[in-house]
Image: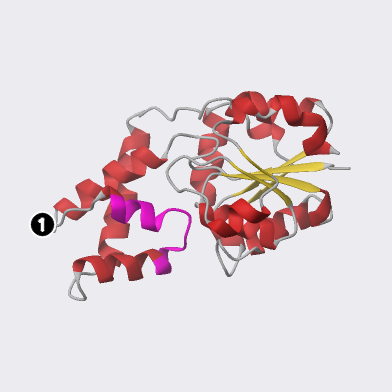
Amino acid sequence: MITSVIFDMDGLLFDTEVIYFECYKKAAREWGLDFTFELFKACIGISREEAAKFMQQYFGKEVNPSQIHSRTYELVEEYLQKGGPIPFRPGAKEAVKFFYERGLKIGLASSNMRKWAEFYLKQKGIFDYFSAITTCEDVTHLKPNPEVYLKTAQKLQTPPTLCLAFDDSAPGATAAIAAGMRTCMVPQISQPTQFIRERAFKIYRSLQDIYPDIDELLA
């Protein structure tokens, strides 16, 4: 029986991917570059280093991806400091609260920075539901490597096979599957690969759609 539920953050709990895309576009424009949505899609859910490789392939080796990343983070910080909205994804808050009130332990497995993860969770009023938070600062390898999910399970003191994982990106869902968890993908921008379609427990359009399957998800 499932005893813990682990959520990804960006694109699953919060509609932050659009914010990041706009900031990447603004940052790249300062160097006269067009950061397209297709490039953004390729960079979702992977490490900064892997994203840098895509950016250099796209823009050319003369471009410094670190500068674009750093400027993007500055723009995101400015957005947050100005009180820019951080919308929940449909059904996200309700799903976290639902599993918490059923007595399951709740964890976060995010490739984002801890300060942003804690800021988002606190600002949106769900921080106290989480017994474990794992971010890029806690691991050596990011998604699709399973380390961030395995470390979250360890913090929750739960075997991976007793964890239910939700992730919106293909690298994230791949990581959760590789960790041995009962994995559900809820795609937003990144779409499931054949590997995920064959191995994910469920694929949902929204966290609002999980409730008819609750008994099966938690069995």
Residue name at image x 74 percent, y 53 percent:
181
| Residue 75 visible in the current orientation | no
Whether 169 is among the magenta residues is no
Residue name at image x 60 percent, y 54 percent:
196
Residue name at image x 83 percent, y 49 percent:
162
Q: Which residue is mark 1?
A: 32
Q: Residue furthest left?
A: 32
Q: Amino acid at mark 1?
A: Gly
The image quarter in which residue 96 lies: top right
Question: Can you give x and y, in whole percent of width and height, for residue 74 in the image?
Answer: 31, 49
Number of numbered discs visible in the structure rendering: 1
Position of 204 relative to 150 (above/below): above
Question: Can you give x and y, in whole percent of width and height, for residue 122 in the image?
Answer: 57, 32
The image quarter in which residue 152 lies: bottom right
Q: Which residues are magenta?
A: 38-50
Main SS class of the magenta portion in the image = helix
Residue nearest the viewer, comparing 7 with 36: 36
Question: Can you give x and y, in whole percent of width and height, for residue 35 in the image?
Answer: 22, 53
| Residue 155 visible in the current orientation | yes
Position of 83 relative to 76 (above/below): above
Residue name at image x 84 percent, y 56 percent:
159
Question: Can you give x and y, in whole percent of width and height, for residue 63 in the image?
Answer: 20, 70
Q: Residues within 10 Å of mark 1 (few under 14, many from 20)?
A: few
Residue nearest the viewer, comparing 201 with 101: 201
Q: Is residue 147 left or right of residue 52?
A: right
The image quarter in which residue 107 lies: top right
Position of 95 relative to 200 (above/below): above
Quadrant in the picture for the N terminus: top right
**Disc 1 on helix, strand or loop?**
loop
Q: Is residue 192 left or right of residue 54?
A: right
